[in-house]
Amino acid sequence: MVVAVAESGSVTKAAATLGIAQPALTAQLNRIDRALGGCVFVRDRSGARPTELGELVLRHARVLLPAMSALADDARRMVNQATGRAGALRVGTLGTGLGGLFVNELHGALGGLTITTATPGSVDDAGSRLASGVLDVALVGLCSDFTPPQSAEVTWTRVCVDPMFVLLDEGHRHADRLEVELAELAEERWLYVPAHGCTEHCFVTACVRAGFTPHGLGEAEWTAAVDQVRAGRAVALVEPGQLDPAGVRTVPLAGAPLRRTHYVGWRQDATVRMDLEAVESAAFRAHRDAVRRSPNYERWMAAYGELV
């Protein structure tokens, strides 16, 4: 928690990163202050800045956190082996709308294996979990300018590149368009369905290239984003491949200025436990399933073909 606040410079931002409520994080920071006998941060309207005591805590925390992570990984491996779960296929998905479809395809392709799922905290975390053996397979999505972390223990294969679409209220002036220019949405308030890591950077860069600076970019899970879009309060940046709920429309952005690349990765030694061709094929089939269930994406693919 202390590291998250220091890196974000804000209790509010750190709470969002950690996935907890801001009052809960504030209460924990107050407990930490009491336990240590002094304030770890100076907190005011401009944010949160480490005190001298805070800098001391951070120096120790940045040593302890990797050590605790290694301990947790080693313990999981030992427990998995001791309880016989080593025969399970441990699958992580992150930053991709294909995760559920991919797991479903794996169940069909690898019927003899038990499949367990996890959500890593970041793409780097997914790579670390693969390298350490905590995960066997991972499917991740990244903005197209980024690639997964490389290591000798892990192999990554690119599955597809998807354009990002915009989710509009069905009464929006552009809702019936076949595609819309990003610049035509310059005055909108934007949301994005959590995609982790690079979305905000890529979005702001695309907006600047389109000739405007966005008013803001908020994060919302799928249901909350749909509710806000349906109410006319925002538009949302989403991956295609979702069935449009009642009251909203998914519209392509002209020229695909924002793209998301999906990668499937596995440990090098996983070849002795599973059919890697079947895993790869499951990822490609998951993408084809996503295209088929979205009429707008099917039309877009028919017009433009697959992105590279």
Image (cartoon, rainbow, N blue to C red):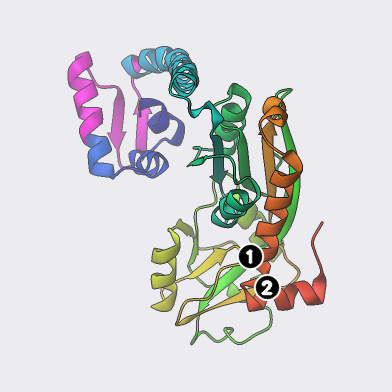
- Tell me where residue 286 sits by quadrant: bottom right
Mark 1 or mark 2, whichever is nearer to me: 1
Contact between labelled residues 2 and 1, with CB atoms less than 8 Å apart: yes
On whether residue 42 falls in the magenta region, the answer is: yes
Near mark 2 (Cα within 10 A), the count class, few <14, some 14-19 or many ≥20, is many
The quadrant of the image that shows the N terminus is: top left
- Kindly identify which numbered label has been placed on residue 50: none
| Rendered image quadrant of residue 39 | top left
Q: Which residue is mark 2?
A: 297
Type of amino acid at the residue the image marks with label 2: Tyr
Residue in the foreground of this view, choosing between 252 and 14:
252
The residue at the point 70 percent across, 25 percent down is 269
Q: Is residue 150 left or right of residue 30?
A: right
User: In front here: 287 or 208?
Assistant: 287
Choose between 300 and 146: the one closer to the eye.
300
The relative height of residue 79 versus residue 88 in the rendered view (above or below) is above
The spot of residue 99 in percent (x, y) is: 56, 52
Q: Indicate left or right for 149 with 232 as reference.
A: right
Residue depicted at x 37% and y 43%: 19
Q: Considering the numbered disc 1 on the image, is that residue within a helix, a strand or a loop?
A: helix
| Residue on which disc 1 sits | 290
- Span highlighted in magenta in the image: 27-52
Point out residue 110 in the picture as x, y percentages from the top left corner: 63, 45
Mark earlier in primary sequence (1, 2): 1
Q: Quadrant of the C terminus?
A: bottom right
| Coordinates of residue 82 in the picture (x, y in percent) | 45, 18
The quadrant in which residue 250 appears is: bottom right
